[in-house]
Amino acid sequence: MSTLYERLGGQQAIDVAVDKFYRRVLSDPYINRFFEGVDMEKQAAKQKAFLTMAFGGPNNYTGKDMREGHKRLVHEMGLNDSHFDHILCHLRSTLAELGVDEATIAEAVAIAESTRDDVLDR
Amino acid sequence: MPTITFEGKDYACREGESVLECLERHGVLLPSSCRAGACKTCMVRALAGTPPKEAQQGLKDTLVVQNYFLACIAKPTEDLTIGLAKEGELYRAQVLEKRMLAPNILRLRLEKPDGFRYWAGQFINLVREEDGLVRSYSLASLPEEPFLELHIKRIPHGRMTGWLFADVQEGDALAFRGPAGDSFYVQHDPEQPLLLAGTGTGLAPLYGIARAALAQGHTGPIHLFHGSLVREGLYYVEELRALAAQHAQFHYYPVVLQGTPPEGGLVGDMKSLPVERLGDLTGYRAYLCGDPELVEALRRAVFLAGVGMNDIYTDPFVFAPA
């Protein structure tokens, strides 16, 4: 059984997915304030690492990094579940745009969902 | 067993070990994060030796040709000398010509020193040897030209520009290090449409990149937007028109924020005008140069208009305080 990452097309598919996903996020007025003033290239690289993980690809995910990385957003800018939910929506839409079936999308979303408490520092 | 040389010391690499793991086993910690070739935190440059191809996947062309690679996924097959950043050699070059291009913009042409190699669009760091003052200037010349061309904007009370405008004379020798920078033309797809946008002396690298692309036979459309507050700040208008007349695929748009543009030019805000004018930019490659605020605004605008993140090349001019 191949991994989700392989089924989605590996590294090259991730590069395409990152641009589509990041464009959706930046165009969403409900959450794009969290991305103001950040270095777009570095941010895209982080999103690539995140999507690679969500797709079950090679990663070195540490809840601690995820927690540290979002702490300021949670405690100073009010990042909460509703924003996290928007991100999951964009993940679903991005994968659907790439022609991924719903069952596979559900797998990726479940992996992303597992980071929720780390991201929201609970 | 390949050997990794870093900061003058040799480290033996074991079978199946990555460059990052090899150095860590010897107590040398490089910055790293995802360890899966995604986040680019551990990017290093091979100063000697060829890095494994798979460790360059997902990097920009201009980084690949400079032998940058990701240490976390690089399992070396040959000896490598690596560095985090390369402080270029010190060169000295005679000033061949000093000429004003616009009221506050000076063109300097320096003799190209023997052995100095660069890509059009990279920059050099001029060094004032008496006190070590350093400032970066982009190269507007082509590597095959016998001179290096710099466009220098006068900064109020700027120490380097004050000296260059007032004291440096034709025939003097100037010192510099370099080249540096990742914003240049690498022929990847000769038909890919290119957007080049910059303000003020941000034209310098774009002028080099556009001519390098044409010289290498780029056939896709090349759109160059050069912006200035007012018409007096635009320069090379005739040269760029002549380039457009010679090459049907090259399009030149002089842009002013206020007042009347040169004939055929546009009035508007450079942050949004290129996208408004060209519309959907899917499949484009973009080169953005000049004021950092403009570069960041354009980066976002062109990305949202469809340019892939790896197809955006930038050269923000950070002006050091006087």
Image: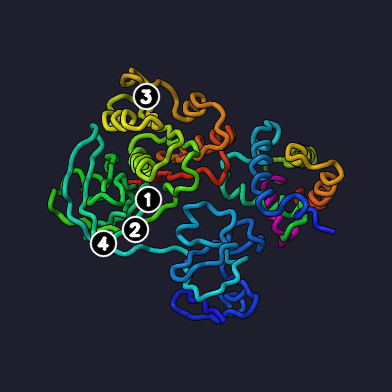
Which quadrant holds residue B302? Answer: top right
In the picture of the structure, the residue carrying the numbered disc 2 is B178
Question: Residue type at mark 2?
Answer: Gly
Question: Residue type at mark 4?
Answer: Tyr
Q: Chain of mark 2?
A: B
Q: Earlier in the sequence, mark 3 or mark 1?
A: 1
**Is residue A66 on the magenta stretch?**
yes
In the picture of the structure, the residue carrying the numbered disc 1 is B122
Q: Earlier in the sequence, mark 4 or mark 2?
A: 4
Q: Is residue B38 left or right of residue B296?
A: right
Q: Chain of mark 4?
A: B
C-alpha gap between disc 4 and disc 2: 8 Å
In the picture of the structure, the residue carrying the numbered disc 4 is B91
Question: Residue type at mark 3?
Answer: Val
Which residue is most to the right?
A103
> Which sits in the foreground, B102 or B280?
B280
C-alpha gap between disc 1 and disc 2: 9 Å
Question: Residue type at mark 1?
Answer: Gln
- What span is in magenta? A59-74
Q: Are marks 1 and 2 in contact (CB under 8 Å)?
A: yes
